[in-house]
Amino acid sequence: MTITIFENASVIDVEAGKLLADRHVAVEGATIKEVSERPVAATEARRIDLKGRTLMPGLIDAHVHVTAFSANFTELQRSSPFYVAAAAARIMGEMLDRGFTTVRDVGGAEFGLARAVEEGLIRGPRLIYGGKALSPTGGHGDTRLAGVDRHDDSYNQPGLGAIVDGVPEVRRRAREEVRRGAHHLKIMGNGGISSPTDRISSDQFSEEEIAAVVEEAEMANLYVAVHAYTARSIKRSVRLGVRSVEHGNLADEEAIALIKERNAFLVPTLATYRALKDEGVEAGLPKELAAKIDDVLDAGINAVEMAQRAGVQMAYGTDLLGAMHRRQTSEFVLRSDVVPAPDLVRAATVNGARLLRLENEIGQVKSGLRADLIVVEGNPLEDIQALARPEANLKLVMAKGAITSSAL
């Protein structure tokens, strides 16, 4: 196996929030074999002198839609799956070039794309997927306009959601996603911006339906993520066993406290609301839906501040669509007014790994873990711009032990 040794590296200990100077990191195959204060002896090794640059774990984006080449979900649903796969390949390759070596797709991606990445057919980050998000009729996953009756529910149709009503349908579809290898299940618990017939404030799914999805996930040793904005929706979902709250913009102190009490995760996605406000219509969001953005845009940072104060586990998420994927690192800056840089680094590394239940594989520079690593100029623990501006500061990306890009 190929041995790569990073010499004279400043390694981020993400747990401690410290920069460890003058470290030497040996990678053998796809695994980190050694992190040492002394030079590593090895014959026929590729040696890369980092000259004090920062070496840290590859980034984890815990809320993406890699198939969303457009912000118009109705257009996406009508598109050829072959075209969507080709677009997803470009989107994922660009994510990798920003330093994201693992992403969690919460609506749209499936086993075929994940397999293509794993086999090297598509260049991109490790893809953790949940298949189609479960939505009730008229919910956030229902892209039909008011005058349309038919919904194409075939699995190969490239939409982000599946429409299910009632406990039996919910259980059946949850089991279908488990059968196809899902790493988690996703439900729509609130209205959304991109769905044409619901309201942000509306709860979606009955408590019996939510409890059924949670039970199905737990039987398969998986967990449930919920699309939720309002405090009411967050609280009912978390009480019923949902582990991952996506967005959470309209949370209150009680909802935040409940997330903390239940040891759940919050995945804010401030990047997408700023992007949708700036350029959503240009990127394909129907004009009639753009007005919904203001309902959640300014509230998001308040939810993040409450969660930070309460010590809630937060992961890094972006939820970007179409051409707006290029803004993937903007989430670092948008949270930085209320979240210290070391916690932002944790959100995009070790916290994300714990959320994905991959903490024994990724998220730290540690012997025995997968060699997903990035090299940056500067110290992200002091200046988060080191991660927010990959075009200037990202110098090398290694995924599963293979260097995918390098400017060294």
Image (cartoon, grey):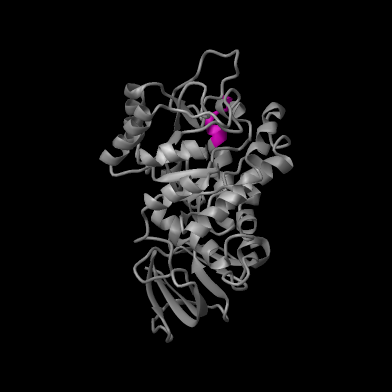
Residue at the farthest left position: 219
Q: Position of residue 326 (x, y in %)?
A: 65, 49
Give whichever of 320, 372 is nearer the camera. 320
Image quadrant in which you'd find residue 222: top left
Quarter of the image with the N terminus is: bottom left
Q: Relative to 39, does residue 197 appear above or below in the rendering?
A: above
**Residue 119 seen from this side:** no
Give whichever of 80, 169 is nearer the camera. 169
Q: Position of residue 124 (x, y in %)?
A: 51, 51
Q: Position of residue 245 (x, y in %)?
A: 46, 44
Left or right of residue 218, residue 194 in this image? right
Q: Is residue 299 magenta?
A: no
**Residue 201 seen from this side:** yes
Q: Position of residue 29 (x, y in %)?
A: 38, 66
Residue shown at the point (48%, 21%) measured from the top left: 137
Image quadrant in which you'd find residue 275: top right
Q: Which residues are magenta?
A: 78-84
Residue shown at the point (61%, 56%) measured from the top left: 335
